[in-house]
Amino acid sequence: MKNILITRIILAITIILVASIYLPEFYWKITKEEAKSVSVYYSVVKDEFVFIKSDIRGAKYVDQKGDELTREEFEEAVPLLNFRQLFVSGKMPDTINGKAIEPKEVKLNNFSLRIRPEIINYNLIQLFPLMESQSGRIRLELPPDLFRITDRMEFITSLTNQVDEKKSRAFTDALLKEGFNFPAKKIYGNLSTMKPFDEGYFVIDSSGKIYHIKMVKGEPFCVQTSIPQNIDVAYILVSENELREFYSLLITKKSEVYFISYDNYRLIKLPVEDYNYETDVMTIRGDLFNRQITYSRENEKVKSIVTNRDYNIVSTYEDNSKGKEVLYTSLIAPYLFPFELSIEESKTPMINFYFSFYDLHYLILSAVLTIVAIIYFRKKKIDISNGLIYYAVVLVTGLYGFIAIMCIRDFNNDSNI
Amino acid sequence: MLNAVVFKEWLKIRWIFIGMLLINLLVIINTYFNVANVLKVYSANIFLVKLITYEILFFEDIMYIPLLTGILISVFQFFPEVNQKRLKLTFHLPVPESKMLFQMTVIGFISLLIIFLFDSVLLSLVSLNFFPEEVFKSMISTLLPWFLAGFCGYFLITMVFIEPNWIKRVVLTLIGIGLISLFYSGTGYAKFEKSWLIFAAISFLFGVVIYVSAYNFKRGIS
Amino acid sequence: MTNVVEVKDLTHYYGSKLVFENMSFDIKEGSIFGLLGKNGTGKTTTINILNGFLKPTSGKCLMFGEDSYSLSPQTKARVGFLIEGHVQYSFMNIRQIEKFYSAFYPKWKKEPYYELMSKLAVTEDQKISKMSCGQRSQVALGLILAQDADLLILDDYSMGLDAGYRRLFLDYLIEYAKAETKTIFITSHIIQDLENFLDECVILDYRTVLLQAPLKSFLSDFKQFKFEVDNHNLKLEKDYVVKNFELVKNKATLYTFEKQSVVEHYLVNNGINYTKLAEVPMTLEEAFIGITGKY
């Protein structure tokens, strides 16, 4: 090797890479704190927010003033969510806000959606089952085939692994009639059969138009929606719901949130601010009176917005205190590690290199370790004169670099092999 | 001279090469029948939808086989070299040592490449036989990090064999295990889709570290 | 005459343990040079430095004028190297190993190799790993001869060989060395075989070189004198006269480079009452033990 220096530096980089992944991982593993979580609910009865604070010891029910509630008090404060329990124990009020309460109606109007950044980043295999939306059966059934939309819409029969030409042609023709530009850019749908009915898929064609595709009595149902072509879609969460108010939730790349309504695909904008689909978990709950949109960022904030059924804000709750409640382990970490490298991230299932930098506090330890290294190599009479670059590495990469040069220990560049 | 090096390396690894080819083949045949039998019990569409939504890796039997292949090829190629310090003979040949080492590792690398290509082709045939080509594409992307782990395993064992110092051998082993474990992160299909090129670059840079061991060998053999 | 190998002020440490200090010697072209020393005196270390498998702590080691730590391929091709224990690629058979090496050496002559092999009771496709130690030594020798190297470096050629194979080995080397320009550098722990073989030798002791001299002058100049004394506890320190001294009961042996008259004078001067002083001739092995001591 003509230049042993370069190969040693590659070794050093490898050590630093591996150390910066495993050391922080190990550190967080041994200093892991107990999990705590807060769920935010809106009490239509009390007209304020109530909370479930849970940790490993169990759940605590708290109102907005911080007073503890019993479980029963909590359930009575959020009657529509807990309607089953309240009907059984006979504590369900007859009327709420002057409206008579029917169990059937409560059930119909209750829904809940949850969207995590991870879902948006999923790279599922792009093959989809198109269910019969009006089979006349009680339960939905998977079709015998899966479709893809490349230069046409193709159905592949799973048993034979062959294209069903007739079905493919029928759907392709139906799409062409609607002006669909092949291939599809994105296909969104709900693959579950555990839902009351099937609304098929929302598909973005290559020109950015959004289509609704489903199958009705074996025939294609393909329509171009009225959703503007220039809307930059990050994700569409299709969720079939007996209420039939909206087909799905649409999130744009600007983190705007819309429902695609049954009213000719009209977009209903939800009044969310500083929501970020790349980092926040969002839950949307609906009931007879309200919509509650809650989004939270890990260890930073939680925000909950309550609207009426016309999506006008009724009440807002915001808590940024999570960020202030800093744990001692997080305080120490910046002094130990110059940066952390991780190849897995909670916000995405994809493997990649995710850096997190702290600040320059680590330089204190770096300086100490550099001095330790200098003294050590002097004492051991290890000649490092050609390798001053290694000390620079320790200074910049701190603990990781220190481990690297302690592992290499040999810095002669005098000859070749 | 290259022919002679190829000849010598082939003499060392031919049986393990053929043996590993067979083991890889058996694992893939097993995979084939596993899938075929699942499809005799479940209807194909239900299995396929499950495969997609739960990200079932129908070929996961092969997961650690490339790593094993890389390790064994290195053992058979380099144990005879370091046993009784035969590497002295090799380095005494009238060829620059780095060139000799490069040729030897490239031969090991190519033999691994052949086995991994063989795996890829056979598994592709299995996949395309049962499933649409989307599954095959995702499968290839899932296999890549396992193959990279195989190359890293080969490089690791090679440098551990050549390195004369026991402490450094332990250090290299720890680094290597740390690196190789990364390739088995994530669950599901094609999770390295966006990063496999970086991981490939890191793997091949890791191969360069063999020269550090060779340098130590030449500098300090006793 | 030119020097094939030049070693100047060679010093080597393993960690903090000194192996030898300021070792210097030259090997002339065409000579048979022996590096003799007891186990652990640094014979293999010297050979490793010479072949570029060890970076010396300090000092210089030149082979054909090149720094031995970074020899060019051309120079390596001129050097035949026998590793301690006749180690070869034991996974090859007789034919394969010849085919392998022939690709690297432009002057390769396969005849001497196959001639040697034909004398062994082995088939051409027998693996080296399945041969006896003696047979393996012949394979290693045959390969070095076929290489037609200008300098042979043989690290303990005698290891594990019985008398017959040792003789066979040396016979071939003598034949090889008849050519004027061929140089042989040899180490061995069986000294007696080398008596009529070496031109020149270096004798190593722990940490130091005891002697470098042509073998003939060493054998003629180095003498042992036996005599009897009354004092059973007599001790003589090594000095300019006494190179070694042993006493068993009343029988004393003194090793020296000096003449008998000088020894007599020395003993008288030191007030030693001796009787029956006589010079006793030595074999190389006895001389070697005499200069290095039994322990």
Image (cartoon, rainbow, N blue to C red):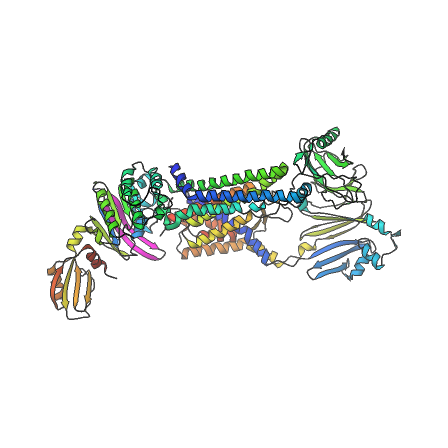
Q: Is residue B170 magenta?
A: no
Point out the image quarter for the C terminus of chain A: top left
Q: Is the magenta stretch mostly helix, strand or loop?
A: strand
Q: Is residue C26 magenta?
A: yes
Question: Could you say which is closer to the camera, residue A170 or residue A339?
Answer: A170
Q: How many labels does the image show?
A: 0
List x then y, in percent, for residue C220: 15, 54
List x then y, in percent, for residue A400: 51, 52
List x then y, in percent, for residue C75: 31, 40
Point out the image quarter for the N terminus of chain A: top left
Question: Could you say which is closer to the camera, residue B188 or residue C51?
Answer: B188
Q: In this view, does A231 lie to the left or right of A92?
A: left
Q: In this view, does C294 lie to the left or right of B136?
A: left
List x then y, in percent, for residue A197: 78, 42
Q: Which residue is drawn at 27% across and 38% down?
A: C111
First to last magenta residue range: C2-30
Question: Could you say which is closer to the camera, residue C197 or residue C12?
Answer: C197
Q: Can residue A97 be seen from the camera position used here?
A: yes
Q: Which residue is drawn at 83% across and 59% down?
A: A89
